Amino acid sequence: MEKSNCKDMWVHIETDGGQVHSVGLELCCEVRKLCDISGDRLFAVVAGEVPESEVNKVKDCGVDGLILVSGTGYERYNTEAYTNLYTELCRKYQPSAVFVGGTTNGRDFAPRFAARLETGCTSDATEVIYNPDSGDIEFVEPAAGGKIMAVITIPELRPQVGTIRPGTFKLAPAGRRSQIDVITENISYPESKIRSKLLNFAADEVDPELDISNCETIVCVGSALKEESLPKYRKLAKLLGGKLACTRPVVDRELLPYKLQVGQSGVMIKPRLYIGFGISGAVNHVTGIDAVTFVAVNTDPSAPIFNYCDYGIVADMDKVCDAMLAALEK
């Protein structure tokens, strides 16, 4: 679609069983800031049957309007139904940008409808910036194995589509606007055209110990970890009332599960206290951390992680861990 004909920014509101996923609310809060600069209006797109109480959560995030879509195909997520939905809506209303949560579902359909519209899609951005000179959204994300931060734009094509992982932005509602426009659409996708069908659904059993997304204290171990030392870091995390986490090399060595991996390719965290042991500080890891207090322990005084931390300790990680355990067990 022509750039000059497109206006307004949209946020996809992902739902599950009628409940709004937090990433949609986080994106509304952040995109509200972009719209305040660009002059665009912010619309949230909600498909399927969603309780009014959940819709109110969206309204409280500063949206100028809602696009409420009814029809068949939205009871459970379906690739083809959602791809068709956004293809039709974008062709009709021509938004300038569409922001989608980087969940399993969002990553699935966002590039699909972008391809149908012959526009670009950026994945897993850690920052979004509006450029008033060009009128483009600048999507910032780690590249080259997390060694650099790349700025990606879609200068000529519209809409600009991007996915952002849950937890990237803070949920800080801007408050309800005095007037919220509501657009209703009925878009159904014929069942005869659906090639993939849900035969059975079983809820995933979540181990509380493996859920670090909302933990207030994180003890994180990196590539310098010795396998025999792992129990002491588990103990430290427990004594601090927190949870153990790790970097990708630790997962690759199969010492800890993927669900405990912190970073752009793992879990985005916002703890009050983060203590990183034996971690170099790759961009891909540190961009996944938004801590009130950031402590780093590394034997290398030139390790990049010291550029991000509040407190740095140049010492052997095991010795520092032992000292902390001794102090806590007094």
Image (cartoon, rainbow, N blue to C red):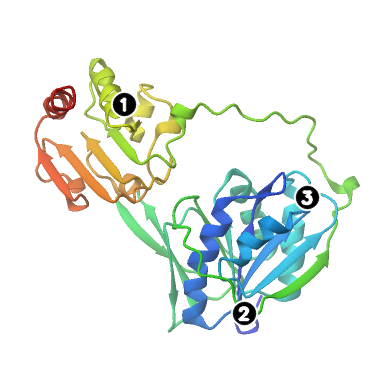
**Left or right of 252: which side holds 221?**
left
On the image, the x and y values in percent for residue 272 come to 31, 46
Residue at numbered disc 2: 178
Estimate the spatial distance between the alpha carbons at disc 1 and disc 2, rounded to whole Å: 47 Å
Query: In which image quadrant can residue 328 be found?
Result: top left
Q: Is residue 255 visible?
A: yes
Residue at numbered disc 3: 74
- Tag 3: residue type? Tyr
Look at discs 3 and 2 and give the one toward the viewer. 2
Q: Which of these two is toward me, 279 or 322?
A: 322
Residue at numbered disc 1: 238
Mark with earlier residue (1, 2): 2
On the image, the x and y values in percent for residue 143 come to 37, 52
The residue shown at (80%, 69%) is 184
- Tag 1: residue type? Lys
Above or below, 64 relative to 185: below
Secondary structure at badge 3 equals: loop
How crowded pointer 3 is (Cα within 10 Å; few <14, some 14-19, many 20+) is rated as many
Above or below, 68 relative to 145: below
Estimate the spatial distance between the alpha carbons at disc 3 and disc 1, rounded to whole Å: 42 Å
The residue shown at (63%, 66%) is 59
**Where, quadrant-wise, is the C terminus in this rendering?**
top left
Mark with earlier residue (3, 1): 3
